[in-house]
Amino acid sequence: MNPVRRVAAFLFDFIVGDDPLMFSVVCVGLAATGIVAALGVASWWLLPMSVLVALVVSVLRVRSRAETAE
């Protein structure tokens, strides 16, 4: 594998990690925070709220998988 491809694979694994859905939720939260801030509205609460929603969704997904495995 050439070095460029190895670096790209490392960066993808480092940034996206194990769960692309959580990466997407955080990216959407960042974009939404930027858009709301550009409109001049207080947007400090939007990113923590999106991370909280991502955490709840992640826990519910794991819980659902654990229940179906039993």
Image: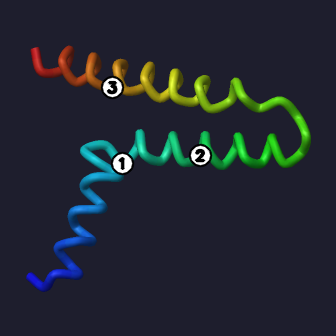
- Residue at the image position 33 percent from the left and 25 percent from the top: 61
Instruction: Find disc 1 in the rendering and name its residue.
Output: 20
In what element is the residue under mark 3? helix
- Decide: few, some or many residues near mark 1? Use Cα within 10 Å; few <14, some 14-19, many ≥20: few
As rendered, which of 63 and 24 lies closer to the eye? 24
Q: Residue 51 location, x and y as percent?
A: 51, 28
Amino acid type, residue under disc 1 in the picture: Pro
Q: Residue 21 location, x and y as percent?
A: 41, 43
Q: Are marks 2 and 3 in contact (CB under 8 Å)?
A: no
Instruction: Find disc 3 in the rendering and name its residue.
Output: 61
Q: Nearer the viewer, mark 3 or mark 1?
A: 1
Is 60 situated left or right of 65 in this image? right
Location of residue 36 (image quadrant): top right
Instruction: Find disc 2 in the rendering and name its residue.
Output: 28
- Decide: few, some or many residues near mark 2? Use Cα within 10 Å; few <14, some 14-19, many ≥20: some
Q: Are marks 3 and 1 in contact (CB under 8 Å)?
A: no
Quadrant, the C terminus: top left
As rendered, which of 68 and 8 lies closer to the eye? 8
In what element is the residue under mark 2? helix
In what element is the residue under mark 1? helix
- Residue at the image position 59 percent from the left and 25 percent from the top: 48
- Residue at the image position 22 percent from the left and 62 percent from the top: 10
Q: Residue 58 location, x and y as percent?
A: 37, 26
